[in-house]
Structure formats: C-alpha cells, structure tokens
Image: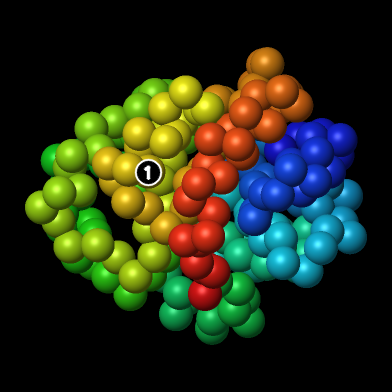
C-alpha cells in the first residue's frame, strides 16, 4: 500500500493484513516514516507487515520501530535469531520463490510462516505473474503457508482450491497502476475469497 485511502478501504473490506514495501527499487516503495502514517491507528487484529529485500538487521529493526510494524516479510535477509539478538522480536514471514529449489527451501523453513511467490524477475515480487501451483503437491509444507504471485479476483478461488494455502497475498491484482489500489478490484478480490474466510488462521 502507498496511499492511506487504500489502506482504509482494504481494512473496511476485511483485509487481515496491510503490507508496506521498504525496498527502494520497488515502484511501491515507501519510507519507514511514510509507512508509519499509512498503517497508523489500524484495528488491533490487522497485521502491519513490512516487506524487505536483502535488508540488514539494523535496517529492519529500525524500520520496525519507526513504522510500528507488527511483522516482517523477508525476501532473503537475516535469521530470526539474528533479529532477536538486535531486539527485533516481531514475527517473520519468509518469502520464497516457487522454482526448482522449492522443496529444499521449504524443508529449511518448516517451522516458519512462508510466503510463496512467482520466480523472480527484475523485482522479487509484485510482478503480476502466476506460477505452477502443482509444485506444492509433493513437497513438505511449512507451519503456515501464504500464496502470492499474480493473484486477482478471477483466479484466487482456483488458486486456493489447488494450493490450499492458509492465506493469500495480493498486490498488482488489485491495482490500477503500481502502488495505486482500485476499490472495485479490492472488493471483487475479497468477495472471491469469502468462501474460505472461515478457514483462515492467524500468523503467529
């Protein structure tokens, strides 16, 4: 999210988490200070997730404090132990790519919350590309699985039925342009997810 009005609309529609990208090359990048304003005063049940790519322990810890984040999503980066040593104890969502190394990567993250995204392009996420969900058929699943990569109102039902995730992540599929969310697309996406909402679990 890059606009406060989009954050408030997503929360009104029932979003369980709001993400802010703290990776400068992304067209959705916001500073930690801007992120704090975006996610200020949200209901307690809504997660405030900072998305980081190859960030250092110090960068993550500082942004968590400034933006009052409740969890972090990491595309590579430090371990949980390294963050805890720096006093950063928020939950971690480990972002992985659905590629040839998926089975090994998932085995190493069995006890973590994992977000599976499409194989990397120029940017690590928000590409609008889907991936072969059947890759999940013969791999061990992590403790908590989030599905990302090219999801939108037209395919999220199929994706959930096929991949059986605990949660779904959407960005480009609800946008009119990078970083600018579209209210109608958000509403359609939430409506498409409605049959599965009673199965949702909390990221711990």
**Camera-nearest residue between 87 and 188:** 188
In the rendered structure, the answer to whether residue 193 lies left or right of residue 6 reads left
Q: Position of residue 67 (x, y in %)?
A: 78, 58
Q: Residue at x 81, y 63 (%)?
A: 43
Q: Is residue 30 above or below residue 94?
A: above
**Camera-nearest residue between 58 and 162:** 162
Answer whether residue 42 is visible to the viewer in this image: yes
Q: Quadrant of residue 109?
A: bottom left
The N terminus, quarter of image? top right
Answer whether residue 117 is visible to the viewer in this image: no
In the rendered structure, the answer to whether residue 162 lies left or right of residue 177 reads left
Total labels drawn? 1
Q: Position of residue 162 (x, y in %)?
A: 27, 41
Q: Is residue 154 above or below residue 75?
A: above
Q: Is residue 47 above or below residue 156?
A: below
Q: Which residue is mark 1?
A: 160
Residue projecting furthest to the top = 176
In the rendered structure, the answer to whether residue 82 lies left or right of residue 71 reads left
Q: Residue at x 20, y 48 (%)?
A: 136
Q: Residue at x 57, y 60 (%)?
A: 72
SS of the residue under disc 1: helix
Q: Quadrant of residue 48?
A: bottom right
Q: Residue at x 30, y 65 (%)?
A: 142
In the rendered structure, the answer to whether residue 3 lies left or right of residue 106 reads right
Q: Position of residue 39 (x, y in %)?
A: 81, 53
Counting other residues with Cα less than 10 Å from the Cα at mark 1, is it few (<14), some (14-19), or many (20 or more)?
Answer: some
Residue projecting furthest to the front = 195
Q: Is residue 146 above or below residue 87?
A: above
Q: How is the image coloured?
A: rainbow
Residue projecting furthest to the left = 138
């Amino acid at each position: 999210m890059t606009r406060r009005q989009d954050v408030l609309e997503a929360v009104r529609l029932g979003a369980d988490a709001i993400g802010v990208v703290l990776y400068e090359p992304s067209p959705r990048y916001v500073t930690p200070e801007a992120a704090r304003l975006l996610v200020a005063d949200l209901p307690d049940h809504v997660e405030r997730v900072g998305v980081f790519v190859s960030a250092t322990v110090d960068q993550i810890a500082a942004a968590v404090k400034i933006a009052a984040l409740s969890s972090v999503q990491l595309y590579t980066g430090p371990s949980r132990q390294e963050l805890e040593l720096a006093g950063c104890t928020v939950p971690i969502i480990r972002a992985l790519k659905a590629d040839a190394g998926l089975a090994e990567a998932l085995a190493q993250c069995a006890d973590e919350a994992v977000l599976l995204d499409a194989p990397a392009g120029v940017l690590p996420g928000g590409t609008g590309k889907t991936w072969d969900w059947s890759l999940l058929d013969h791999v061990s699943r992590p403790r908590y699985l989030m599905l990302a990569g090219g999801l939108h109102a037209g395919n999220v039902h199929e994706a959930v039925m096929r991949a059986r995730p605990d949660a779904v992540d959407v960005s480009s599929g609800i946008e009119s342009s990078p970083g600018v969310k579209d209210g109608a697309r958000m509403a359609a996406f939430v409506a498409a997810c409605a049959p599965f909402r009673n199965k949702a679990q909390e990221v711990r």
